[in-house]
Image: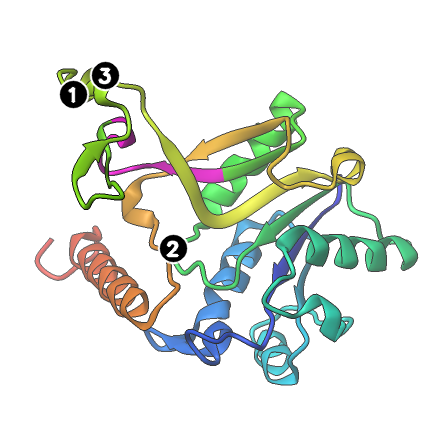
Amino acid sequence: MKAIAIIPARGGSKRIPGKNIRLFAGLPIIAYSIRAAQQSQLFSRVIVSTDSEAIAQVARHYGAEVPFMRPSELADDYTDTDAVVLHALNWLIKSDDTPNYFCCIYPTAPFVRPDILRRGFELLVAANAATTFAVTTYPYTIFRSLRINDHGRVEMFWPENFSKRSQDLPHAYHDAGQFYWANTERYLIEKRLFSSDSLPVVIPRSLVQDIDTPEDWEVAEQIYLAQQLVAATTAPNAKGV
């Protein structure tokens, strides 16, 4: 079985200029996704899809391939991930290198881990699902969420839940924004990473942080550095242990 990693990384980020190769805790942020893919030992190729030569150079430096440059019409603010993945898959098909499975790994996912990538792949194969992807729980139940109405007053989206305990309400999950595994044959039918046959890879909230603004970046970096410090001081060979 052949699996290929596809990392979509365009060059035109507006909110955080140079986002995909900006230094995060000392490394270009895309390096974390490349490294996790390599360390998982699941992929015959780790491919970066980009329209930027600067991103391509960084990706190659960290061991990824950039065998083609993405066309400009697939690198604007409105291009979705599926369009980019399909472009990469079509290139692979034309090159007679169609994978049985592929994993789309986002370039700004410094918390992605090799063991979780493996878990997603194992679930995909064992369940014969179309796709699997990382999700996590909301920190507070969404079923008691509030809104501000047209008159400036606060009201509940679901007032019937006012008297219910949070532990009695269903769990709600959101996309962790890290990766999507897919069975290539099945993906090419529906052409959607979030398909009608997707399974969740549930991960802890401590490994999830959206990075859409400079403030998000700072928060994510501090969390990452704190986790690295804890890991270093609690390792079996740490000083004093």
Label 3: which secondary element: helix
Left/right of residue 50 with respect to residue 133 in the rendered view = right
Would you say the residues marked 3 and 1 are in contact, meaning their CB atoms lie under 8 Å apart? yes
Along the line of sight, the residue nearer the viewer: 187 or 125 = 187
Label 1: which secondary element: loop
Q: Residue furthest front?
A: 151
- Identify which amino acid the numbered label 2 is placed on: Phe
Give the magenta range. Answer: 134-143
Dot 2 alpha-carbon crowd within 10 angstroms: few under 14, some 14 to 19, many 20 or more: some
Does any portion of residue 70 appear in the rendered image? no
Q: Quadrant of residue 160?
A: top left
Q: Residue at x 78, y 46 (%)?
A: 99
Q: Quadrant of residue 173?
A: top left
Dot 3 alpha-carbon crowd within 10 angstroms: few under 14, some 14 to 19, many 20 or more: few
Along the line of sight, the residue nearer the viewer: 95 or 149 = 149
Residue 140 colored in magenta in the image: yes
- Identify which amino acid the numbered label 1 is placed on: Phe
Relative to 210, is 222 above or below?
A: below
Q: Alpha carbon of mark 2 to alpha carbon of mark 3: how far?
A: 37 Å
Dot 1 alpha-carbon crowd within 10 angstroms: few under 14, some 14 to 19, many 20 or more: few
Q: Which disc number belongs to residue 162?
A: 1
Give the labeled residue for mark 2. 111
Residue 45 appears at what percent x and percent y?
70, 58
Q: Which disc number belongs to residue 160?
A: 3
Left/right of residue 159 with respect to residue 29 in the rendered view = left
Residue 77 appears at what percent x and percent y?
58, 67
- Identify which amino acid the numbered label 3 is placed on: Glu
Relative to 49, is 188 above or below?
A: above
Label 2: which secondary element: loop
